[in-house]
Amino acid sequence: MSLIRTANVCKSFGELTVLKDINMSVEQGEVVCIIGPSGAGKSTFLRSLNQLEKITSGKIFIDEELFLHRENGSTVLRLEQIKYKQLLLEMGMVFQSFNLFPHKTVMENIMLAPVHVKKQSKAEAEKKAGELLAKVGLADKSDEYPARLSGGQQQRVAIARALAMEPKIMLFDEPTSALDPELVGEVLGVMKSLAESGMTMLVVTHEMGFAREVADRVIFMCDGVIAEQGPPEKLFSKPENPRTRQFLNSIL
């Protein structure tokens, strides 16, 4: 079953078209990595799924339900507000920058949305937050403030915060790009364990080793289109598109 599916999704910023008829899906339990050069439209596509960017045209389906349909910049169909918000909450997102609240402790950062959005009790949210901190290897950092954590630790807190909303799918937008090289591994380790636990994941990444090892499918984007996709062993060893070969030869 597709948790997310898009049909002919386009996105323009004025005269600049950055997404051109994107058709793709992510199945339940699947890990999909999106790779490609800077400016390919990868992050814009990810942000379009959870409505941080408004698509110009196309359809987005969540849980096989038509979530949004736009044409020529105008909304043709959007679910009624309650259902719309419910489906949005099924997507957790982790950004390049950690976006933690600096004036709140690690525990408070993780508890905030479950208490205020999902209306969980503080006791329930605190228990869940503690479990998630243990899961990302930060059980001893619950009372720290973000400024006292390394970049890798802050990103692991951001992952725990997204998981606290119990999403069906996790979206990762280049989650290691802002980290010093020696901190990348600890974040990728958490993401790998999430994948092994069966979490559905859509990951925009420059980490080719992670994509090769963890992904069920790799999508190569360039110039706003999906140029090629397939299992990592095929895409990395025998890419069919010349643009894919050129990109991989430049970075591997």
Image: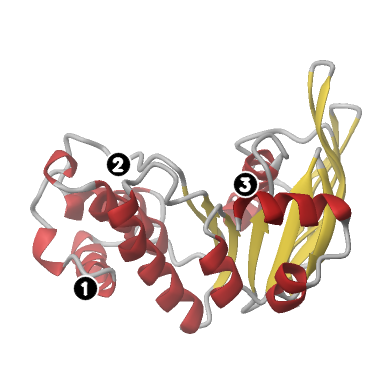
Q: Earlier in the sequence, mark 2 or mark 3?
A: 3
Amino acid tagged 3: Asn
Q: Residue at x 27, y 70 (%)?
A: 128
Between 114 and 148, the residue placed more toward the observer is 148
Q: Tell me if mark 1 has few (under 14), some (14-19) or many (20+) residues whose alpha carbon lies within 10 angstroms of its own.
A: some
Question: Marks 2 and 1: CB-CB under 8 Å?
Answer: no
Identify the colour scheme used.
secondary structure
Q: Residue at x 19, y 69 (%)?
A: 130
Q: Which mark is residue 50?
A: 3
Quadrant of the snapshot with the C terminus: bottom right
Q: Earlier in the sequence, mark 1 or mark 3?
A: 3
Disc 2 is placed on an element classified as loop
Question: Marks 2 and 3: CB-CB under 8 Å?
Answer: no
Is residue 201 visible to the viewer in this orientation of the structure?
yes
Q: Earlier in the sequence, mark 2 or mark 1?
A: 2
Amino acid tagged 2: Leu
> Which residue is identified by label 1?
134
Q: Which mark is residue 100?
A: 2
Q: Residue at x 35, y 43 (%)?
A: 98
Q: CA distance from mark 2 to mark 1?
A: 18 Å
Q: Residue at x 64, y 37 (%)?
A: 38
